[in-house]
Image (tube, grey):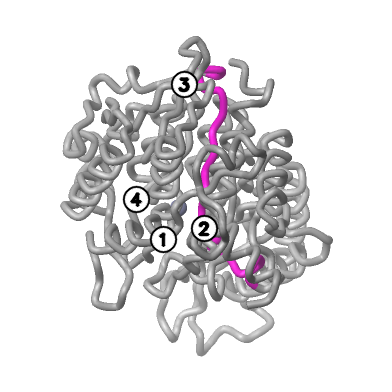
């Protein structure tokens, strides 16, 4: 073990006091050394949580509102009790574990994540941030540390289905959406009841802007940047904005044998040129924006008929919404030009949008300080995936911490993060939480 590996292992709490010659008591905290979590216990809890909804391939299918989801929540409630958190389920079905602060007049700091998964998902997405939050609370208790702000560890319900739990709390969830059918087969309303919430009293779970002193979430990166660049910790600059359109290309369906090549209005040919144009335009400007045509269907869809209509999608993502709009405008201009070549037309209908959620620059600074104190390297980066943190960003200062995902794989059984990186992430979370608690920013 070289010096860097040694300090990384030390920071990760993987070396026992016997080897480091120091203890994890609160004396270290008062002496100015950053307090750390029990990384070994955290990783053990993650392995235990992986049993609920376990797949033969090694990952989990723990759909929101399934039996596996409910059982995993019972397990988490047990961990909260062990961590001396007083646990409640709000009307929206989210689990909150509360720990009092020294000043009850202050607004709470929230931190946590989710434990539901996609079908055939992995063991780290959401789980790392959820169990790390509980581990931080337990470590604070064991080390006799009392924060000024009340703390609330939160396990959001149904993140993967569309941030239902966190959007209920931020007030973005509409009553109509309660009738949406989730992947479990239950409606959102029935799912909330199944988890012990009450959809008829959803308003009670709602919080207003300023009701929280801050929100922190640790999460796996779900991409390969940190691993590739050998960086320990990602400091999330914000969660990208997303716009999705349904694109209808209209031409003229005709006989594939008798219509000469120069007299065709082939909608699929235009759509194929469109796919290429999207890629060309999105990559023509510097930056980390992404653009995708993810679905396409040709009509009537027969080998011997020239496609008269194509319905496809366009999705654009970036932290900067103005850039998304600029790219869209270039793409639609190019679509018109492509259509003119063979007399087909393009029509765009917006399906869905998600405004970008920037993290708070001051919280980013606290995360950076916390990582530096632990000897960890950092990189400021956007999150290309959606997270509950984006709903919380509307209520108070938000910060997100990423740890490396091996191979950049996520939403799959091969999703993996190293035990040492998980411990590092939890330690950075703990440090950032204590700095946020002490800062004058989190006065509300
Ligand atoms: Zn997640």
Residue 338 against residue 216 in the figure, above or below: below
- Seen from the viewer's position, the closer of residues 337 and 33 is 33
The answer to which of marks 1 and 3 sits earlier in the sequence is: 1
Q: Position of residue 115 (x, y in %)?
A: 34, 50
The residue carrying mark 2 is 13
Judged from the image, the secondary structure of the residue bearing numbered disc 4 is loop
Describe the element under mark 2 as helix, strand or loop: loop
Q: Nearer the viewer, mark 3 or mark 4?
A: 3
Give the distance between the C-alpha atoms of the residues marked 3 and 4, in whole angstroms: 26 Å
Placement of the N terminus among the 4 image quadrants: bottom right
Question: Horizontally, is 416 left or right of 266 in the view?
Answer: left
Residue farthest to the top, as pictured: 105
Please give the residue where the numbered disc 1 appears in the rendered image: 40
Q: What kind of element bears circle 3?
A: loop
Q: Which mark is residue 115?
A: 4
Is the residue marked by circle 2 packed among few (<14), some (14-19), or many (20+) residues within 10 Å? many
How far apart marks 1 and 3 lie (CA) works out to 27 Å
Left or right of 301 on screen, residue 93: left
Is there a contact, CB below 8 Å, between mark 2 and mark 1?
yes
Of the 4 image quadrants, the one containing the C terminus is top right
């Amino acid at each position: 073990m070289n010096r860097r590996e040694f300090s990384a292992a030390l920071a990760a709490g993987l070396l026992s006091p016997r080897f480091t010659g120091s203890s994890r008591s609160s004396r270290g905290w008062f002496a100015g050394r950053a307090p750390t979590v029990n990384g070994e216990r955290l990783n053990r809890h993650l392995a235990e949580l992986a049993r609920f909804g376990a797949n033969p391939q090694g990952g989990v299918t723990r759909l929101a509102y399934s039996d596996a989801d409910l059982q995993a929540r019972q397990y988490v409630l047990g961990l909260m009790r062990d961590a001396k958190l007083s646990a409640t389920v709000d009307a929206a079905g989210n689990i909150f574990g509360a720990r009092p602060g020294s000043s009850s007049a202050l607004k709470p700091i929230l931190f946590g994540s989710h434990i539901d998964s996609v079908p055939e998902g992995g063991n780290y997405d959401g789980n790392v941030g959820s169990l790390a939050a509980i581990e931080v609370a337990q470590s604070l208790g064991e080390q006799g540390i009392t924060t000024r702000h009340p703390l609330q560890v939160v396990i959001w319900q149904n993140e993967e289905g569309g941030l239902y739990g966190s959007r209920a709390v931020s007030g973005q969830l509409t009553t109509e959406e309660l009738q949406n059918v989730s992947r479990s087969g239950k409606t959102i309303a029935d799912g909330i009841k199944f988890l012990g919430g009450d959809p008829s009293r959803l308003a009670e779970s709602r919080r207003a802007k300023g009701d929280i002193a801050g929100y922190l979430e640790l999460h796996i990166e779900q991409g390969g940047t940190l691993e590739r660049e050998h960086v320990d910790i990602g400091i999330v600059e914000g969660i990208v904005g997303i716009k999705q359109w349904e694109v209808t290309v209209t031409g003229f369906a005709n006989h594939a044998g008798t219509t000469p090549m120069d007299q065709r209005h082939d909608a699929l040919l235009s759509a194929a040129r469109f796919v290429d144009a999207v890629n060309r335009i999105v990559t023509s400007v510097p930056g980390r924006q992404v653009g995708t045509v993810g679905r396409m269907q040709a009509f009537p869809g027969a080998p011997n008929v020239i496609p008269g209509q194509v319905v496809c999608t366009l999705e654009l993502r970036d932290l900067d919404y103005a850039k998304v709009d600029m790219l869209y405008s270039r793409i639609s201009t190019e679509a018109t030009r492509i259509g003119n070549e063979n007399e087909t037309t393009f029509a765009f209908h917006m399906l869905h949008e998600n405004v970008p959620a920037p993290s708070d620059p001051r919280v980013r600074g606290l995360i950076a300080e916390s990582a530096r104190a632990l000897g960890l390297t950092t990189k400021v980066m956007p999150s290309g995936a959606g997270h509950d943190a984006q709903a919380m960003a509307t209520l108070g200062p938000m910060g997100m911490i990423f740890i490396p995902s091996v191979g950049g794989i996520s939403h799959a059984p091969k999703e993996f993060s190293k035990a040492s990186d998980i411990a590092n992430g939890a330690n950075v979370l703990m440090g950032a939480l204590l700095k946020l608690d002490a800062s004058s920013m989190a006065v509300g």
